Amino acid sequence: MSKIIRLVLGDQLNPRHSWFSEVNPDITYAFIECKGEGSYAPHHVQKVVGIFQSMRTFASRLESQGHKVYYHKILDSREIELIDILHSASVKNNTHELQFMMPDEWRVKENLESLKSRGFKISFVSSEHFISTPEEFSNTFKGKKSYLMESFYRKLRKRTGILMEGGNPTGGKWNYDAQNRKKLPKNHVLPAAHVPSTNVEDVYQEVLEANLPVIGSLRDPKHFYWPTTPEQAMDIFENWLEHCFEFFGDFQDAMTVSNWALYHSRISFALNTKMIDPLTICQMAEEYYHNNENIPLNAAEGFIRQILGWREFMRGVYWERMPEFADTNYFNHQAKLPQWFWNGKTKMKCLSHSIKQSLDHAYAHHIQRLMVTGNFALLAGIHPDEVDLWYLGIYIDAFEWVEITNTRGMSQYADGGWIATKPYVASANYMKKMGDYCQNCSYNEKTKTESDSCPFNSLYWNFFERHRDLLGNNFRLGMVYRTFDKMDVHTKEAIRQRATYVLEHLDTL
Ligand SMILES: Cc1cc2nc3c(=O)[nH]c(=O)nc-3n(C[C@H](O)[C@H](O)[C@H](O)COP(=O)(O)OP(=O)(O)OC[C@H]3O[C@@H](n4cnc5c(N)ncnc54)[C@H](O)[C@@H]3O)c2cc1C
Ligand code: SF4
């Protein structure tokens, strides 16, 4: 029996949290694996296994440090929902006081708050993970209709002193994104992804037995290759600093059929479960940049911007705009996600490769998510709910605060421009410029209106034509509309016809 139960959620595995700094016999730390959290979306099996394995290791460590731990495994009871299991455990333990780290998800926060009406004394503390706070975000954008990542990022650079010299940005510029758009040169040899190896057979068997609605594959549970401890995550990151950091900027947007990680760091799962600390990661990257001449500034700034900039910014938008964010559908898109999003069986190489890779590894890098799958879903007019569900399930790093803002906001423009200043859409030109998908595809990337023309090409123009009333006045799209308007009527009609065919045959592309 203990006076207080402190719940540790699967994405709150922060070993540096002040909760754990001293042992208190009056406090029990509760870890709950449950069907409710594992089945509100069909999650990738690697994500479920990765979270449960990481929770179990974290709980055993706390126990070995002398903390009291209550651990509910997925098969331990028939109860489904997190709060019901927590309620039962508290009653058994005769505990009336529950303490929580602030969850990162609106739905979970509401659920935990509802325990008050069941007679518990509840309280929340910070998760002590993020560099910024929702309040800082709110104050930065008070009275604004849209939010600019760049201004929030600059504010955080100044406050943390990261990549700053005196009051100025290192190198004289804040942002080197324009240098980060190179295609991989021919015969460029990419490093193999450095990965850990953990035996997760027990957890995997239990997940299968629990009949959770999982997707994707886990080929070798004896050698699980996502980090499940902070040490493994740091090992991946340190190896990345040594072997990949140098090229991260240059090839950040590159795509290829021959490698799944390129120069990306693969630390998002460890960051989002809070095993590792974002400020420490940015400081380590900065220090490595200063100590190693081979690391160009566009790589250092580009990497730090993703974490200090985009990641903190997306969290701010989430808390500022939820729950209304989850209902946005600016274009009133209604189509269903094609079936092949769940198995990769499409003739479009860029999509089949990105989807199959996602099913195999629970991972795709940013440009695959934004400019391949996201681009297609937006051009094809898929309902944002369907798109969200897919992204929330398939990626190992998908937690709603960072998934929905990226998917519904940045990728689908369903928020009408709170996050992005224009929709991220592109034709095959972009795909061809940034990768090698088109040369391995059944469709012709050069044409728009033939029966074998790349579907992106007609959909691209048709998207802008369909949504002229919503996008026509966007100053960043003036050039697009001017180019479209210059096309002759026959070309416009042929594009319309091909796009209509594509939209009516999404499932068989
Ligand atoms: C449609 C869509 C959905 C996405 N869903 C998620 C998601 O569910 N969870 C998630 O963590 N990221 C998401 N992202 C952002 C990004 O794609 C991933 O963070 C990144 O691919 C993770 O791989 P990495 O660790 O190798 O990243 P790297 O390319 O090595 O970048 C380093 C780190 O920067 C951070 N980062 C980079 N881009 C973003 C971004 N746009 N927003 C927030 N953080 C960023 C991540 O923590 C990442 O680990 C999404 C992007 C898009 C376009
Ligand atoms: S031709 Fe079109 S569908 Fe095929 S890989 Fe290129 S962009 Fe994708």
Image (spheres, grey):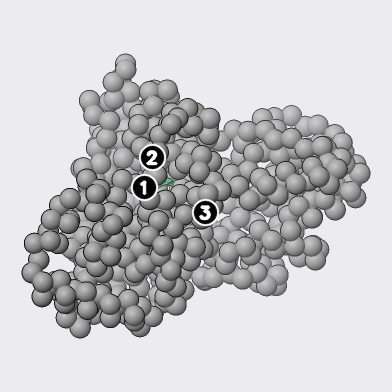
Q: Is residue 417 above or below residue 281?
A: below
**Which residue does the numbered mark 1 point to in the structure image?**
417
Q: Nearer the viewer, residue 10 or 237?
A: 10
Lower sequence index among marks 2 and 1: 2
Q: Which quadrant holds the N terminus? A: top right
- Measured from the top left, where is residue 458 in percent x and y? 22, 71
The dot on residue 146 is 2
Q: Nearer the viewer, residue 148 or 468?
A: 468
**Does residue 500 appear anywhere in the picture?**
yes
Give the quarter of the image for residue 384: bottom left
Q: Amino acid at mark 2?
A: Ser
Give yes or no for contact between labels 3 and 2 (Cβ–Cβ under 8 Å).
no
Kindly give the residue lying farthest to the front in the view shown.
469
Lower sequence index among marks 3 and 2: 2
Q: Is residue 317 above or below residue 228?
A: above
Query: Residue 223 vs residue 305: left or right?
Result: right
Local packing at callout 3 (Cα closer than 10 Å; few below 14, some 14-19, many 20+) is some
Q: Nearer the viewer, residue 112 or 45?
A: 112
Kind of element beneath mark 1: loop
Query: Residue 487 vs residue 158: left or right?
Result: left
Q: Amino acid at mark 1?
A: Gly
Kind of element beneath mark 2: loop
Give yes or no for contact between labels 2 and 1 (Cβ–Cβ under 8 Å).
yes
**Which residue does the numbered mark 3 point to in the structure image?**
326
Lower sequence index among marks 1 and 3: 3
Give the quarter of the image for residue 505: bottom left
- Measured from the top left, where is residue 329 in percent x and y? 44, 58
Local packing at callout 2 (Cα closer than 10 Å; few below 14, some 14-19, many 20+) is some
